Image (cartoon, grey):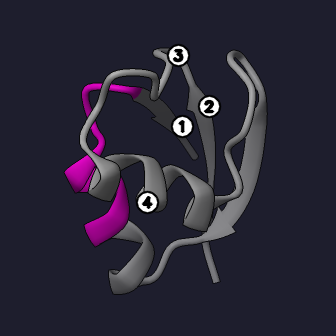
Amino acid sequence: MAQLTVTLIKSGIGKPLKHRQILQGLGLKKLNKSVIRDNTPEIQGMIKKVAHMVKVSE
């Protein structure tokens, strides 16, 4: 299965609770830190919700 590298580029401070929960669910805690996740529809949906705060690469 393909994997995605997701990097947090904007802070969750001051953002809606739902966005902060999504970042936590993705495993993103600190700025400029990356996590590797499987490319599933669930993960794609989470990334779509916080697309303005993350950078995604394959």
27, 35: nearer the viewer:
27
* Disc 1 crowd, CA 10 A, few/some/many (<14, 14-19, 20+): few
CA gap, disc 1 to disc 2? 9 Å
1 or 2: tag closer to the N-terminus: 2
Marks 4 & 2, CB-CB < 8 Å contact? no
Quarter of the picture containing the N terminus is: bottom right
Pointers 4 and 3 in contact (C-beta within 8 Å): no
What stretch of residues is rendered in magenta?
45-53
Tell me, for residue 22, which label it has, or none: 4
In the rendered image, the vertical position of residue 31 relative to residue 47, given as above or below: above
Q: CA distance from mark 4 to mark 2?
A: 13 Å
- Residue 9: which numbered mark, if any? 3
Whether pointer 1 and pointer 2 mark residues with C-beta atoms closer than 8 Å, the reply is: yes
- Compare marks 4 and 1 and give the one earlier in the sequence: 4
Mark 3 → mark 2, Cα distance in angstroms: 6 Å
- Check whether the beta carbons of the residues at disc 3 and disc 2 lie within 8 A of each other: yes
Residue 11 x %, y %: 50, 18
Helix, strand or loop at label 2? It is strand
The local crowd at label 3, few if under 14, some if 14 to 19, many if 20 or more residues have their Cα within 10 Å, is some
From what the image shows, is residue 18 above or below residue 34?
below
Query: Residue 38: x percent and y percent?
Result: 63, 75
Of helix, strand and loop, which one carries label 3? loop
**Mark 4 or 1: the one toward you:** 4
Q: Which numbered disc covers residue 7? A: 2
Q: Residues within 10 Å of mark 4 (few under 14, many from 20)?
A: some
In terms of secondary structure, where does tag 1 sit? strand
Type of amino acid at the residue the image marks with label 1: Ser
Q: Depth-wise, is mark 1 or mark 2 nearer the camera?
A: 2
| Amino acid type of the residue tagged 4 in the rendering | Ile
